[in-house]
Amino acid sequence: MDTALDLFVACLPGLEPWCAREFAATGLVPADSVREQSGGLALRGDLHDAFALCLHLGTASHVLVRLAEFPCHHLAELRRRCDRIDWTRWLPRNARLEVRATTRRTKLYHSGAVAERVELALREQLGPAPEPATDGSAPLAILVRVEGETVTISCDAAGAPLHRQGWRLEGAKAPLREDLAHALVLASGWDPSMPFVDPFCGSGTLPIVAARIAAGRLPGEGRTFAVEQLCDFDAERAAALRGSVAAGHREVTVPIGAADRDAGAVAATRANAERADVAAALEVVEGNWRDAPGLVDPGAVGAVVSNPPFGKRVGDARLVNLWQSIGAVLGRLPEGWRLALLSADRRLALRTGLPLKTAFLTRHGGLGVRAMVRGAAVD
């Protein structure tokens, strides 16, 4: 039986090129088999590939395993077609499921009715739902998308979103999602042989992501994924992969500095770094951003990657002054230093006076934001 399935790696809009670059670097599946699409990457692979993608990718939010796709015109037909599919090929009997549906430009506009029909067909084959879990584990998410006259049914291989890596439990104001932080680090052009500095560290997402990359730790380490519950999932092969990943851990030998003037943010960074098992790799100071480790006495060529305050109004004099100061300080760094700054407005970033270019546009906290970089390749 052919075990290859259609997989879709979902990411934040705008991060598709960086997700593709990260994917290509893993070597998991031939890169020429991957199609970059709006919202992610489409490829063919088996359940182990889906597991490996969940483990390796820091810029992704979900990995979807397509279970079925068919034309459909009305609810009765939806139920009949779902009844004909052998769901036991993938889903265990008496599985805990959560069926969610979205509809777009279709006569099957009632998403609740769509989800209900699919769940009835699933339960007909899999048996009744078990009692709610007491261990906090999430049910298998079955995602139904109806677009026009096409129904696509997928299982979320990740379970909880991939950017929830389990170590960022302490928060600060407007914390970055881990996947957005990962993309910003990639866009900066930083590599683990370079010093790394974040002078506005907040809850520490950026320096922790960098430290974990430098330490050879994968984004999905320490997590379990929903794909491990599916039928025919090879647990022994997955355990071997986890073991090989753990064997690749290494000591961080480059300085990774972080600073924030807020004592709570500094405490959050240290607590999060401890959970991420990279506390020893970070030098975190409380104080003015200009005093961040690495900026006071810059040595070897490195990278400044940060999410400075950007507010919502570009005309705010304090923000303009801040970004002009950022430009003055970073502009004095030795030639070759990489820069990547997240901003809600290009005009504010250009107040730095630095030759910054847009690496990507995406969403953060309900705002459109852009990564502005210097010294890195930009598509």
Image (cartoon, grey):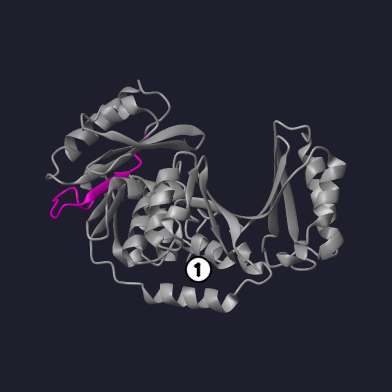
Name the residue located 74 percent from the left edge and 32 percent from the top edge: 106
Which residue, given by chain and number where applicable, does mark 1 sit on? 222
User: Which secondary structure lies at badge 1?
Assistant: loop
Can the viewer see residue 202? no
Q: Which residues are magenta?
A: 292-309
Which residue is at the front of the view, 299 or 354? Answer: 354
Name the residue located 43 percent from the left edge and 54 percent from the top edge: 32
**Quadrant of the image for the N terminus?**
bottom right
Position above or below: 378 against 133:
above
Name the residue located 42 percent from the left edge and 76 percent from the top edge: 244
What secondary structure do most residues of the magenta stretch adopt? loop
Quarter residue 228 falls in: bottom right
Position above or below: 42 against 129:
above
Q: Position of residue 33 (x, y in %)?
A: 47, 54
Tell whether 332 sits left or right of 207. Answer: left
The local crowd at label 1, few if under 14, some if 14 to 19, many if 20 or more residues have their Cα within 10 Å, is few
Mark 1 belongs to which amino acid?
Gly
Q: Residue furthest front?
A: 1
Q: Residue furthest top?
A: 315
**Quadrant of the image for the C terminus?**
top left
Q: Position of residue 374 (x, y in %)?
A: 24, 39
Position above or below: 170 against 113:
below
- Answer whether residue 208 is magenta in the image: no
Which residue is at the front of the view, 4 or 325? Answer: 4
Name the residue located 83 percent from the left edge and 38 percent from the top edge: 74
- Answer whether residue 295 is magenta in the image: yes
Tell whether 242 sits left or right of 227. Answer: left
Q: Position of residue 230 (x, y in %)?
A: 67, 67
Tell whether 89 sits left or right of 362. Answer: right
